[in-house]
Image (cartoon, rainbow, N blue to C red):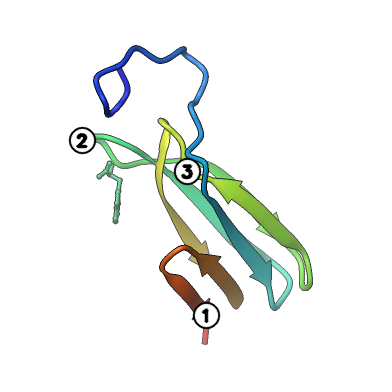
């Protein structure tokens, strides 16, 4: 069941919005965290310096966690991760 109460297919329904993560060092890890009561990491993606991930939030993915130095662009703005 989608957030608007409409049945959705088993496949993930992506939001129309994208986030962009650009790795500023090797070995940046982006983890996808599940939506709902249970928060677990269901996928991780490793980027090397200069690599860019363009992604959407979905029925399955409510949040992401970024480890390492990266530039993160979203609707709410731009932020840097890592020290
Ligand atoms: N399972 C959580 C949820 O659906 C995932 C989540 C959303 C989350 N926002 C978060 C986890 C912020 C940590 C921090 O609400």
Q: Where is mark 2, residue-wise? A: 37
> In the depicted view, which residue is nearer to us: 16 or 10?
16
Which residue shows up at 60% across the image and 75% down it? 71
Q: Which mark is residue 57?
A: 3
Q: Residues within 10 Å of mark 3 (few under 14, many from 20)?
A: many
Q: Which residue is mark 1?
A: 80
Q: Is 35 situated above or below 79? A: above
Disc 1 Cβ-to-ligand 1 distance below 8 Å: no
Q: Residues within 10 Å of mark 2 (few under 14, many from 20)?
A: few
Q: Position of residue 80 (x, y in %)?
A: 52, 80
Q: CA distance from mark 2 to mark 3?
A: 17 Å
C-beta proximity under 8 Å, tags 2 and 3: no
| Disc 2: residue Cβ within 8 A of ligand 1's nearest atom | yes
Residue placed most toward the observer, 18 or 62: 18
Which is more foreground, mark 1 or mark 3? Answer: 3
Q: Nearer the viewer, mark 1 or mark 2?
A: 1
Task: Name the residue furthest left.
Answer: 37
Q: How far, Cα to Cα, is label 1 from label 2? A: 28 Å
The residue lying at 26 percent from left, 34 percent from top is 36
Crowdedness of circle 1 by 10 Å Cα count: few (<14), some, many (20+)? some
């Amino acid at each position: 069941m989608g957030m608007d109460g409409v049945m959705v297919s088993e496949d993930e329904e992506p939001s129309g919005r994208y986030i962009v993560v650009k790795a500023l060092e090797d070995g940046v890890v982006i983890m996808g965290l599940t939506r709902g009561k249970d928060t677990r990491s269901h996928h991780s993606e490793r980027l090397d310096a200069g690599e860019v991930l363009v992604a959407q939030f979905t029925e399955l993915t409510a949040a992401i966690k970024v480890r390492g130095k990266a530039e993160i662009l979203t609707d709410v703005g731009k932020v840097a991760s890592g020290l």
